[in-house]
């Protein structure tokens, strides 16, 4: 495997489970068809679904791209931060925010990351970590 020189910062590669790419591809296909969160149909507002689906599908595709390169927690967290920031105005209710967080939690679980380092709870509480200035 060739090392990626694009992330020469303090990113350290992580060991991704062997079937992560296949699982991410399956989630991407499902997300492109309908939002599936926590193995059940979603209940997010109809008006939010088209854009929400596009953002979740893009996040999943980005996860897949990172997985095929030199995956690092930092790279995955950048994707989560970008997705949450874009979804923030669409997920208005607590239930909507919990469902979005559950989706990203599923993605992190697939790639073997067991904690969002506070990102998902902060999003659910409507206080995104990435929004700090």
Image (cartoon, rainbow, N blue to C red):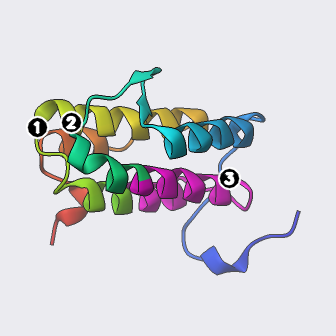
**SS label for mark 1:** loop
Q: In the drawing, does residue 45 fall left or right of residue 75?
A: left
Residue on which disc 1 sits: 93
**SS label for mark 3:** helix
Residue on which disc 2 sits: 96
Residue on which disc 3 sits: 67
Main SS of residues in magenta: helix
- Frontmost of labels 2 and 3 is 2
From the viewer's side, name the closer residue of 42 and 47. 47
**Quarter of the image where one finds residue 6:** bottom right
Give the number of marks: 3
Q: Residues within 10 Å of mark 1 (few under 14, many from 20)?
A: few
Quadrant of the snapshot with the N terminus: bottom right
Instruction: Measure how far apart labels 2 and 1 are at the Cα level.
Output: 5 Å
Q: Which residues are magenta?
A: 54-80
Q: Earlier in the sequence, mark 2 or mark 3?
A: 3
Instruction: Measure how far apart labels 2 and 3 are at the Cα level.
Output: 27 Å
For the point 74% across and 73% down, the residue is 4
Name the spot of residue 21 as percent of width and height, x first.
72, 43
Q: Residues within 10 Å of mark 2 (few under 14, many from 20)?
A: some
The answer to whether mark 2 and mark 3 are in CB contact below 8 A is no
**SS label for mark 2:** helix
**Image height of 100 relative to 39, above or below:** below
**Image height of 90 relative to 22, above or below:** below
From the viewer's side, name the closer residue of 33 and 81. 33
The answer to whether mark 2 and mark 1 are in CB contact below 8 A is yes
């Amino acid at each position: 495997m060739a090392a990626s020189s694009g992330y020469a910062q303090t990113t350290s590669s992580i060991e991704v489970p062997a079937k992560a790419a296949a699982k991410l591809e399956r989630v991407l296909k499902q997300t492109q068809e309908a939002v599936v969160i926590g193995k059940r149909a979603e209940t997010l507002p109809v008006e939010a679904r088209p854009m929400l689906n596009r953002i979740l599908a893009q996040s999943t595709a980005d996860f897949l791209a990172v997985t095929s390169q030199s995956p690092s927690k930092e790279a995955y967290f950048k994707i989560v931060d970008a997705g949450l920031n874009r979804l923030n105005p669409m997920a208005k209710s607590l239930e909507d925010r919990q469902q979005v967080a559950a989706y990203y939690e599923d993605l992190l679980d697939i790639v073997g990351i067991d904690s969002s380092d506070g990102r998902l709870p902060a999003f659910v509480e409507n206080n995104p970590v990435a929004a700090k200035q």
